Amino acid sequence: MSIDSLRRSARATVSGLPGGFWWLWLSTLVNRTGAFVLTFLSLYLTQELGYSAWYAGLVVALHGLGGVAGSPLGGMLTDRWGRRPTMVAMHLSGAVCAAALALVTSAWGIAVVVLLMGVAMQAVRPSINATIADMVPQPDLRRAYALNYWALNLGFAIAAMGGGAAIVLGYRTLFVVDAVATALCALIVFLRLPETRPETPRDTAGNAVEEQRVSVLDVLRDAPFRTLVLLNLLVCLVFTAPWVGLPLTMVEEGLPPSSYGMVIAVNGVVIVAFQLLVNKITDKRSPVMLLTVSSLLFAAGTGATALAGTPVAFAATVVVWTIGEMVHVPTNAAATARLAPEHARGRYQGVMGMSWAVAGFVAPILAGWVVDGPGSDVLWLACAVIGGAAAVGYATRLRRALAEEPAAGGAAAGAGATGEAETTASVGS
């Protein structure tokens, strides 16, 4: 492929999206560029403050637990307050928590701050995803989610490199920089991003029509969407396992801890370098096909980890499941937007985000337990089986629901909020 063709491909990937999307994209990039807290938190707790590794792991788990509560909370606020107020409030809350970590040193204080930070960081995601669904036309939706995900990883890569170089200034300085970047993100949203929440519908006389309130339980009664959430939870478990199981497996193989850093860096490098190309290749493809293929890539990549024994081999497995990640994340977000009725987009995105948060809390615990007990090979075999099961689920349980026209998908989702029998019929399972 020539340079000119690559340039045309990149231009096609980023063209045709509304200006508001690019302000949101910029806010994501700025926010993630300053994302130092989670990257260096465990080192700060153990090396700077002298806490045990057990306590550091508990604190990181509390961040994930906060996300379990924050995601549905953010979804509810997104639909009630609006997208823009929720983003501004949660970004500012996250900035306050990051600044507080530079001051708080007690065990209980740190635990509470990190828990609240987990709530704030996860609560902002439904409003971001709902805003993209509001402003981007349906045919371009998956591309928009892919570009936003690319910005997230590009910012994180910059943060990892900058944080490593700036760590000589001290961990507290990094946390303050994180707070400033998050506050700047809130400022960009406040000044440049319009509110996109759909207006209240009105009858022929011009009177506001009260929309049916949708709770988290109502969302879960939508059978097609419930299936999508459960299958995404399986994929998230597989995706999260390597972040704990991979370094433990590499140590078992006699590799030095430094080799893990190089191997896992492949994940970010591949995403930053090839997300736009992957998006071009997968554009306009069937969402069911993409979700099925991504699940198989997760299964193959993690399952092959049991056969790896050298850094190069481990890096190759990371490449495989990273490609699955690049395909899965934007496709799943677009599928969520497609099944959600307009007035409940925030809640639907919040429930979907909760599946990611639950996996982020549960998978590290399970992965550590399996490696310490039955062994790492069992962990990777289980990941392959779970990924394969998810692929079968996507191919057989969601084919009709995600093949419908967008309007029909929204209608099916709205029916799901009122009665499970109707939505079960729409799945055709």
Image (cartoon, rainbow, N blue to C red):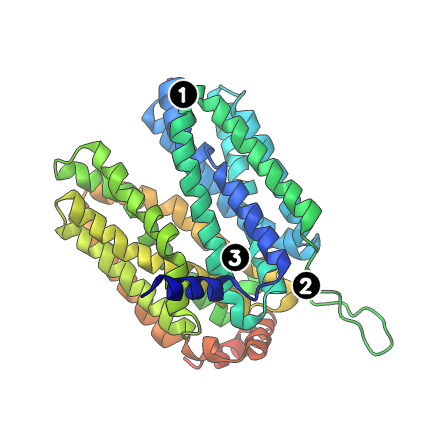
Indicate which disc residue 168 carries.
Answer: 1
For residue 275, above or below residue 9: above
Q: For mark 3, what is the residue? A: 351
Q: Residue at x 52, y 26 (%)?
A: 101
Q: CA distance from mark 3 to mark 1?
A: 40 Å
Q: Is residue 382 left or right of residue 97?
A: left
Q: CA distance from mark 1 to mark 2?
A: 52 Å
Look at discs 1 and 2 and give the one toward the viewer: 1
Q: Quadrant of residue 297?
A: bottom left
Q: Is residue 25 left or right of residue 64?
A: right
| Mark before the other along the chain sequence, 3 or 1 | 1
Viewer-nearest residue: 273 or 406: 273
Q: Quadrant of residue 348?
A: bottom right
Q: Which quadrant holds the C terminus?
A: bottom left
Indicate which disc residue 213 carries.
Answer: 2
Q: Amino acid at mark 2?
A: Arg
